[in-house]
Image (cartoon, helix red, strand yellow):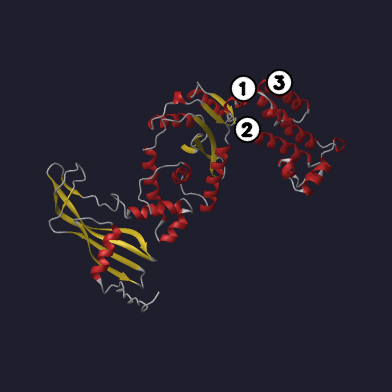
Amino acid sequence: MGGATRRWAPVRFQPLTMESPVRDLDLFQLALGLESPWRVERSEFDAEAKRLDIYIDFRPGGTFTCPECGQRGCKAHDTSEKTWRHLNFFQHEAYLHVRTPRVRCERCGVKLVEVPWARHGSGFTLLFEAFLLALCKAMPVAAVARLVNEHDTRIWRVLHHYVEKARFEADFSEVRRLGVDETSSKRGHNYVSLFVDLEKARVLFATPGRDAATFTAFCQDLVEHGGDPDQIRELCMDLSPAYLKGAREVFPQVDVTLDRFHISKLLNEAMDQVRRQEQKEHPELKHTRYLWLRNPQDLRRLDAERLAELLPEEVGLRTAEAYRIKLAFPEFWRGPFGAARSYLHRWCRMARESGLEPMIRVAKTLYQHQEGLLNWFWSQISNGLLEGISSLVQAAKAKARGYRSLRNLITMIYLLTGKLEFDVPSI
């Protein structure tokens, strides 16, 4: 193309500094989403202290809504200074300082107005609280406290508030399939029982203990959230006598399915008892625990070769006999329902005839609860989901190095696994 080349004139932008207060205040006004009568009056920036303070006031003659009855047009009676921690301004802590009015309502008297950027009684803005919730899902509360330079007690207050509020509003009216399991709260015999919605993969209820009373507590909580105990159709859990008793009392209409993973755990524990007893006479069994516990197809080549040396009947190890009995049980789950009962009876007879006391005890238990095992062929449910949830809780507990109270642990369980809907702004 002919003609002279067109030159674009450079555009000069005015830098945003504290020397341009009008533009700064307009920016903060927009960023905070303030609407009349609220306005940003001034700001103070301290680079050395890494702090930004924003001062908010309301326009003269401005009116507000009564926080009690919702009446509009209420005028300010007096004011008090309030401060909220806000999201950081880059790496600098930001605080909102507000001349907060109390209004005089004809019906309710003098009341402190509700500000749109924070909930009543909190020292954090809504956006900062949403930020805390997101962080606490990914890292320990103590680490979050160090990151944001706040005491962890203040952060726990935020978590308790939002979790309890979200649980209060949760709807359990569609719950039909339940899984029940326990997770340890700390070392020793300290447990929290978890009641899980198997269809939506969420923890519905967490409560201290693992006795029959936990079922009564869950039933009450279920009703409070719009659920109906009579609508529960399927229930999966382990062989805990306390849990079985609670299920019979609270959900008598439900056929309980015994969890496959717990059955496998029982078999492994019984087999390992045989190994521990026998290794006193056979030192070659020492340090072989995981050879017997892992599935044969999961063993490395060297481990498989070592196991093959111990398995032959001519070696005469009782542990090998227990191992063969254990490996025979999964055939029960693969068989058709019509053959399952007879297979279970044959397996129990084989375990009893082995003369291995730990395996005999497991056989007696499974024979006694065979209906719960057979129910699996109809329900096809297990607590594998609960095992995953428990692992998630234990991992969070380990990273946090424990929790100071059961309330904190249960709050974290709901936060991580409750699939709760939190009423916070997006960040």
Residue 29 image offset from top left, x and y in percent: 26, 61
- Residue tagged by mark 1? 371
Q: Quadrant of the N terminus?
A: bottom left
Q: CA distance from mark 1 to mark 2?
A: 13 Å
Using the image, tell me which numbered label, if any, was put on residue 113: none
> What's the residue at 76%, 34% (across, down)?
322
Check whether the beta carbons of the residues at disc 1 and disc 3 lie within 8 A of each other: no
Please, what is the three-letter code of the amino acid marked with disc 2?
A: Arg
Q: Upstream in the sequence, badge 1 or badge 2?
A: 2
Residue 63 image offset from top left, x and y in percent: 15, 52
Q: CA distance from mark 3 to mark 2?
A: 18 Å
Task: Provide the secondary structure element on which disc 1 rests.
Answer: helix
In the displayed structure image, the side of residue 203 where residue 265 appears, left or right: right
Q: Nearer the viewer, residue 200 or 257?
A: 200
> What's the residue at 37%, 50% (across, down)?
158
Specify the quadrant of the image occupied by residue 171: top left
- Residue tagged by mark 3? 342
Q: Nearer the viewer, mark 1 or mark 3?
A: 3
In the displayed structure image, the side of residue 306 where residue 57 appears, left or right: left
In the displayed structure image, the side of residue 244 where residue 22 appears, left or right: left
